[in-house]
Image (cartoon, rainbow, N blue to C red):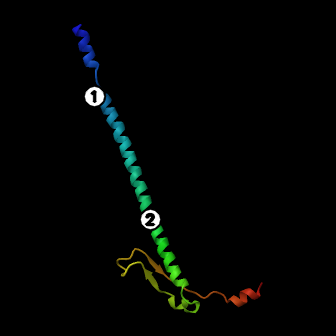
């Protein structure tokens, strides 16, 4: 009877190989999940930056649309920054203004 009890005790629990394999699987899963998390975090930051740039550009376009049409040529070559100084700015808009074809000649072609 003692022999049977010893065999039962020696079979109880996990072997070192089983624990090692389980830890290897767990570490692999955590490494893959961590890599995907970092990739997604980078994508989110890029999307946030793109969204902020689009919002800033929309603001610049609204400011320009509030200007009289005849004064738009005075903005040619100007730069707009989202901060007080160029060094602190995240975004910069460089304007290139050109004259469109005259509206009267375009309407007379129709």
Residue 55 vs residue 31, the one in the foreground? 55
94 displayed left or right of 23? right
Position in image of residue 2 (x %, y %): 22, 9
Dot 2, crowdedness within 10 Å: few (<14), some or many (≥20)? few
Q: Which residue is mark 2?
A: 48
Kindly state the secondary structure of the residue where label 1 is placed.
Answer: helix
Give the quarter of the image for residue 65: bottom right
Residue at 76% x, 88% y: name it: 108
Residue at 28% x, 24% y: name it: 13
Q: Which residue is mark 1?
A: 16
Position in image of residue 94 (x %, y %): 48, 81
Looking at the image, which residue sits at the far right? 110
Looking at the image, which residue sits at the far left? 2
89 displayed left or right of 61? left
Whichever of callouts 2 and 1 sits on the residue coming sooner in the sequence is: 1
Dot 1, crowdedness within 10 Å: few (<14), some or many (≥20)? few
Q: Is 76 situated above or below 4?
A: below
Mark 2 and mark 1 in contact? Answer it, CB < 8 Å: no
Q: Is 106 situated above or below 9?
A: below
Quadrant assignment for the C terminus? bottom right
Position in image of residue 92 (x %, y %): 44, 78
Position in image of residue 75 (x %, y %): 50, 88
Spatial distance from mark 2 to mark 1, Cα to Cα? 47 Å
Give the quarter of the image for residue 20: top left
Residue at 39% x, 46% y: name it: 33
Residue at 44% x, 67% y: name it: 49
Looking at the image, which residue sits at the far front? 66
Identify the disc placed on residue 78.
none
Kindly state the secondary structure of the residue where label 2 is placed.
Answer: helix
Q: Is 104 situated above or below 34?
A: below
Q: Is 4 situated above or below 29?
A: above
């Amino acid at each position: 009877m003692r022999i049977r009890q010893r065999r039962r005790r020696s079979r109880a629990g996990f072997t070192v190989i089983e624990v090692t394999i389980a830890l290897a699987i767990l570490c692999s899963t955590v490494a893959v999940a961590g890599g995907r998390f970092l990739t997604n975090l980078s994508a989110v930051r890029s999307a946030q930056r793109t969204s902020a740039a689009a919002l800033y550009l929309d603001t610049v376009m609204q400011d320009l649309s509030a200007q009289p049409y005849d004064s738009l040529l005075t903005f040619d070559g100007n730069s707009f920054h989202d901060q007080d100084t160029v060094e602190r700015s995240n975004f910069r808009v460089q304007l290139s203004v050109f004259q469109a074809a005259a509206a009267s000649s375009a309407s007379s072609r129709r």
